[in-house]
Amino acid sequence: MTVTHGGLDLAELRSLGLRPQDVLDFSSNINPLGTSNAVRRAAAGADLASYPDRNCTALVEALSATLDIQADHLLVGNGATELIHLVCRATLQPGDRCLVFDPTFGEYEAAAKIAGAEIHRFHAEHADAFRWDIDRALSTIRSLRPTVVFLCNPNNPTGVYLDAETVERISAAVAANGLLVLDDAYAPLVADAWPPEPLVERYGAAIVRSMTKHHALAGVRLGVLIAPPALCAAVRALQPPWSVSSVAQAAGLAAVEDEAHVEAAREVVRESKAFLAARLETLGLAVTPSAANFLLVDVGDAARVRSALLERGIAVRDCTSFGLPGHIRIGVRILDQSARLVDVLTEVLRSDETR
Ligand SMILES: Cc1ncc(COP(=O)(O)O)c(C=O)c1O
């Protein structure tokens, strides 16, 4: 099963006569300040000739100290995506039920399907600003008794961010029969995020945390599983050796010590997102309220708007694969670049192409 993702497609760019460096990419939701200098330096200093440390010892120690979590509750992976797939393989048997809070990141369903699970979706509606009816979700969990539940918080692509009390209620309902997998890939770029780590001890939940978004390491691949020791061990047993490169480990170690870079990015996101939301609304577009570093925008015909923008050197995410063919998702970039997007989108909407 192929899942559609953001990011640039070289073949498509070539067909349009564009080079990646000609395109402003709003289609993936990466730290708008890019990779920090400290992380770049650390990555450049990695030993390329030797095999990486299979246990990611130094990085696990640093994460353990920073998060105040014992090392046996941590597993580093080749991006959150690897960990999502391995958690599914470790926990799901053919025919097991997997519930996905939807619309959301496509890899949960893909990974659960590969493991043979039966997929159930708990849907949030456009009319409710994509906020789930939590009481109904709880009764679905109680009656369906899924083996695994995926919840993305803040959610991709909607930006809906559930508070601690709500996620605690979901965790408690799931824990009776199954495992809650909480993906908080975008939480570090939320203005006032709450820490979900206590859910691991309290409800046996698993947290899948990407380091590729807030530290801008998507090309390096780095993610962390925070989970009960037995689950970490089961996932680890399925993980190929040397899955996390020396470059990724070195970059990750420097990243853990570079919270200032993430803090600076949060401020850029706050300002640029407010600007974008206000300007897009001025254009008559409905913008879903988002706690994350991206905005879901109703443009009517996402495929056509995306194509028209790309021809002009602007990449956005067409949300058709999320079941939202009228929406695009815009990853927040620095203010100047966001202003450029607004200008080009204004031109596109005024032209006949997308009508
Ligand atoms: C919610 C969510 N989780 C995980 C990922 C993938 O993270 P990684 O790059 O660490 O594999 C993405 C990437 O788009 C995402 O949107």
Image (cartoon, rainbow, N blue to C red):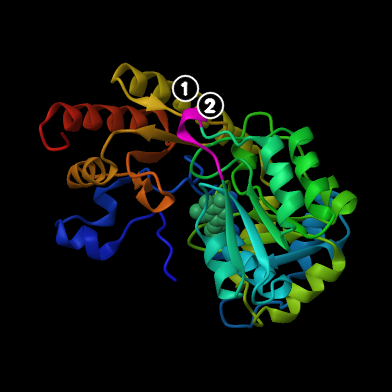
Residue at horizontal 19 percent and vertical 29 percent from the top = 349
CA neighbours of label 2 inside 10 A, class few (<14), some (14 to 19), many (20+): some
Q: Can the viewer see residue 280 in this picture? A: yes
Residue 102 x/y as whole percent: 54, 47
Residue 100 x/y as whole percent: 60, 54
Residue 239, label in figure: none
Residue at horizontal 74 percent and vertical 40 percent from the top = 167
Q: For this view, does 36 lie left or right of residue 342?
A: right
Residue 199 x/y as whole percent: 83, 48
The reply to whether the C-beta atoms of the residues labelled 2 and 1 are less than 8 Å apart is yes
The quadrant holding residue 3 is bottom left
Residue at horizontal 15 percent and vertical 33 percent from the top = 355
Check disc 1 and report the residue beneath it.
274
Q: Can the viewer see residue 46 in this picture? A: no
The quadrant holding residue 328 is top left
User: Of 303 and 76, which appears nearest the observer?
Assistant: 303
Does residue 127 show up magenta in the picture? yes
CA neighbours of label 1 inside 10 A, class few (<14), some (14 to 19), many (20+): few
Residue at horizontal 77 percent and vertical 50 percent from the top = 142
Residue 288 x/y as whole percent: 46, 29
Report the magenta residues as a range.
123-129
The type of residue carrying mark 2 is Arg
Give the spatial CA distance, label 2 vs label 1: 6 Å
Check disc 2 and report the residue beneath it.
270
| Quarter holding ligand 1 | bottom right
Does residue 81 show up magenta in the picture? no
User: Of 42 and 132, which appears nearest the observer?
Assistant: 132
Q: Secondary structure at mark 2?
A: helix
Vertical placement of residue 311 versus 82, above or below: above
